[in-house]
Image: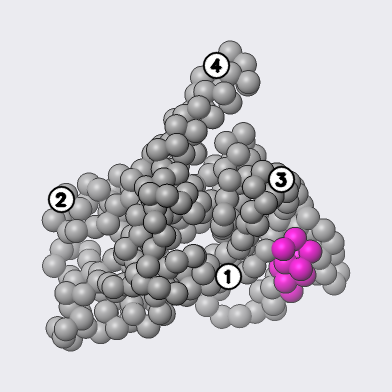
Amino acid sequence: MLRDSRTKPAHVIVLGNEKGGSGKSTTAMHIIVGLLKAGARVASIDTDGRQRSLTRYIENRAVWAKRSGLALELSTHFNVPPAEGETVADIEDREFRAFAQAISRTEYGYDYVVVDTAGSNSYLMRVSHAMADTLVTPINDSFVDLDVIGRVEPETYHAVGPSHYGELVLESLRQRALVDDTRCDWVIVRNRLATTPNANQRRLIQGLEELSGRLGFRIADGIAERLVYREYFPRGLTALDHLDGKLPGTEPTRAHAAAGQEIARLLEVLGLPLLRPPTAQEPLQALRGSATGGAGRDRPPFAGLHGGR
């Protein structure tokens, strides 16, 4: 069963990367919906007050739920707006106060708090990293994105050492350990995976694995380069939502089932506490039920997931 959210603080999941375009908000939304479908009480905080990608995703989901009549799960959401001030210190203080207020309202009463951060080295981004129980860093499957975390030798592709974001994370983890002696689980999630393995991908994995040994993160496969993920955003849908074809543009497809399997595997690898992860077969089974008109038609892909581990 899930933790007693009235007496124990929520487990904080932070999505972070000092580079934009890595799929942070998409990954965050799928983690949020996966946890909600598992029966968890989930709050979410968007600290990127300018871009607001996660906030817009959740707003789109609320609008589409009302318009379509679908029972779409929603987190209790907070957006930290950008502050104004005469000095940098004034701006940081006002943004921190807004962030602290959101944290104080979500620390108890929820099982999980999912925090999406800006793709830049900002004050709130560093504060968020220092609070993480689980830090999820999505990266595109390329050496350009890998270079943000660590450097590799150009001839052998062997890891040389941490880069600027890697150093930021290590310092954040050090600060967290000093405060409450809690070890953060850092997971690098490889997004936009190529469907066919190639030599460049093998070299990238080699560099990641060597950096993993040095920096202490785990590696997980995330989402492939699929058009379906881009199509979800305007309606706030995810690969975990049951599509039954009753509304235009909601026909279940093989791409939807494959995407659902990817997210199921990711949730399983994350191994979040007190949550039994879904199996990678459930989205495909739900699709088959929809296609055949069988018993799976009215059953969401991840129904009944909560329980003991």
First to last magenta residue range: 206-216
On-image quarter of the N terminus: bottom left
Task: Tell me the SS state at disc 3.
Answer: helix
Q: Nearer the viewer, residue 60 or 282?
A: 282
* In front of the other: 238 or 296: 296
N-terminal-most mark, 3 or 1 = 3
As helix, strand or loop, the secondary structure at mark 2 comes to helix
Decide: few, some or many residues near mark 3? Use Cα within 10 Å; few <14, some 14-19, many ≥20: few
Query: Most prominent secondary structure in the magenta stretch?
Result: helix
Quarter of the image where one finds residue 308: bottom left
N-terminal of the pair, mark 4 or mark 3, is: 4
Cα separation between marks 4 and 3 = 31 Å
Mark 4 surroundings within 10 Å by alpha-carbon count, few (fewer than 14), some (14 through 19), many (20 or more)? few
Q: Nearer the viewer, mark 2 or mark 1?
A: 1
- Residue 302 at what x, y percent from top left? 31, 72
Q: Quadrant of residue 210?
A: bottom right
Question: Callout 1: 10 Å neighbours few (<14), some, many (20+)?
Answer: many
Q: Nearer the viewer, mark 4 or mark 3?
A: 3
- Residue appearing at x 69%, y 60% in the figure: 146
**Closer to us: 263 or 154:** 263
Q: Which residue is mark 4?
A: 85
Q: Tell me the SS state at disc 1.
A: strand
Label 3 vs label 1: CA separation? Answer: 27 Å
Q: Amino acid at mark 3?
A: Leu
Q: Which residue is mark 2?
A: 67
